[in-house]
Amino acid sequence: MSTALETNADQRLSLQKSVIEYAEDFLNSLENRKAYEFDSYGKEDGDSFFDIDEQNHLIEDILPFIGERVDKPGLNPASGGHLGYIPGGGIYESALGDYLAAVSNRYAGVFYASPGAVRMENALIDWAGKLIGYTSHFGGNLTSGGSIANLIAISTAREAKKLKGKDLESTVIYTSQQTHHSLQKAIKLCGLGECILRIIDLDEDYRIIPEKLNAQVLEDKEQGLQPFLVIANAGSTDVGAVDPLNAIASIAEEHDLWFHVDAAYGGFFQLTKQGKEIMSGIEKADSVILDPHKGLFLPYGSGIVLIKNIEHLAAANSYEANYMQDTKMHRDEMSPAELSPELSKHFRGMRMWLPLKLHGIAPFKACLEEKMELAQYFYTQIKAMGFEVGPAPVLSTVIFRYLPKDKDANEFNAAIVKAIHQDGRIFISSTTLNGQFYMRVAVLSFRTHKKDIDLLLEIIEKQL
Ligand SMILES: *Cc1c(COP(=O)(O)O)cnc(C)c1O
């Protein structure tokens, strides 16, 4: 029985054939699939098939179940109609990268075990670091997503600034109303929940006002408090705001603050000319995070943390373990295990490296430019339809709402979102800003094109 786990070539071929057929069906039918299945949440009779039992099952029975009960209900992030939260799409070549990584099962945690896998990951960190303008002596890690990347950055900041438990109550962290909630979690997880949190005022485009930040830091210093960390956005999730990074960098430098930039959403827009300009100053940050499963269109499971001084990252994650002594023999390059909380890890470099190698950078850049244009187009059109709009998109997010004459605006706009969800061909999400309900569109799936935006406009028009 134990040999059953070692499939032979014929069995593998047969499994592959079924899985590839399924995947091709899925991809080829995407045009006709909904972006959102509104009425799909209930349990169904056959759902006991989710449960793990003693029995074995055939791929012919398993795949249809996945098709009906996993790949249909809820949101369809592979759809070009996904314009909610921050989409990405999930490029196919990444799936093949994951396949190769899982088949060979290279151990990407330490150089000694797989110099090739570690070189590949380090090459990706090098590329991403140079993209944001770091030049040398920086380090980083490929993570499972932006939240863990933020966590690693904050733990590095704490280590670098040598915070002690007894200092926490007089230590100050500066954020904005637009700061992503994963940073609240990171602060809590790093044991920094007792620090003083200052939420700095924003301008009308939802960007930190540097003068307000500076004034607050000065006031805090006067009171004998210790300014520690400032967190800025390079593309806030809510509205796509990019904080004035150069001005914040100067304040951080003057007052010896750790400067963290959350570029999970916006970071890869630096592949475009406009994005590069608007994020100028990001290279001055002590730490930056990016999300390849957003701006590089990878499937979920890919984040990046970059730390300007690799020593800080190494210090925050250093360890001693007798059973790891062999790994010290070959240390030509730093290992992910020395630069992150993970030891064994998914060989996640392959899912990013393979598509970048196969395509080169140009198509990614073109795709990002297209998304910016589509957001601009949507902004112009929805405004012309009489909607109140938020800031003109600097990246690819638009917030908007309708102000009906004699109805409650919040209820009216929530009803529009519900109607869009019930239709399901396009998915958008909503947010609340200053107590007002806003619809929001984020264009970032590589599969989103003008026809999807036009369809959304058509669906919205029918609700008025
Ligand atoms: C998406 C996002 C995150 C969290 O990243 P995950 O990959 O979802 O964990 C953090 N910050 C910003 C600005 C984001 O858009």
Image (tube, helix red, strand yellow):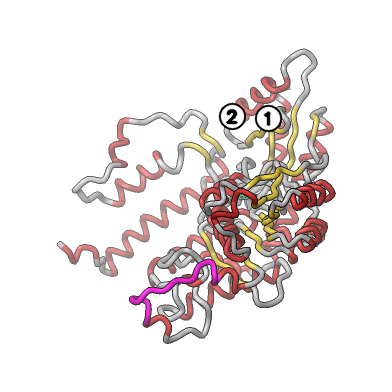
Judge whether residue 32 can be spotted in this image: yes
Which circle marks residue 459 in the picture? 1
Residue drawn at 64 percent across, 46 percent down: 196
Quadrant containing the C terminus in the rendered view: top right
Provide the residue designation for mark 2. 423
- The residue that appears at 57% across and 45% down in the rendered structure is 79
Q: Which quarter of the picture shows residue 137?
A: bottom right
Instruction: Specify whether residue 160 is painted magenta.
Output: no
Q: Position of residue 235 (x, y in %)?
A: 71, 50
Circle 1 packing at 10 Å, graded few (<14), some (14-19), many (20+), is some
**Which label sits on residue 197?**
none
Q: State yes or no: residue 316 in magenta.
A: yes
Amino acid type of the residue tagged 1 in the rendering: Ile
In this view, the residue in front, 417 or 317, is 317
Q: Assign a secondary structure to mark 1.
A: helix
Q: Is residue 19 above or below residue 204?
A: below
Between 214 and 362, the one lying in front of the other is 214
Where does the image place residue 47, in percent across and percent down from the top left?
A: 32, 36
Which percent across, then down, holds residue 258? 68, 60
Residue located 67% across and 68% down the image: 361
| Residues rendered magenta in the picture | 314-325
**Front one among 281 and 105:** 281
**Residue 131, how many percent across, how many down?**
70, 68
Assess disc 2: are there few (<14), some (14-19) or many (≥20) residues with their C-alpha within 10 Å of its C-alpha. Answer: some
Q: Quadrant of residue 11?
A: bottom left
Distance of label 1 from label 2 (alpha carbons): 8 Å
The residue shown at (52%, 70%) is: 339
| Label 1 close to label 2 by CB (< 8 Å) | yes
**Amino acid type shown at disc 2:** Asp
Going from N to C along the chain, the mark reached first, 1 or 2, is: 2
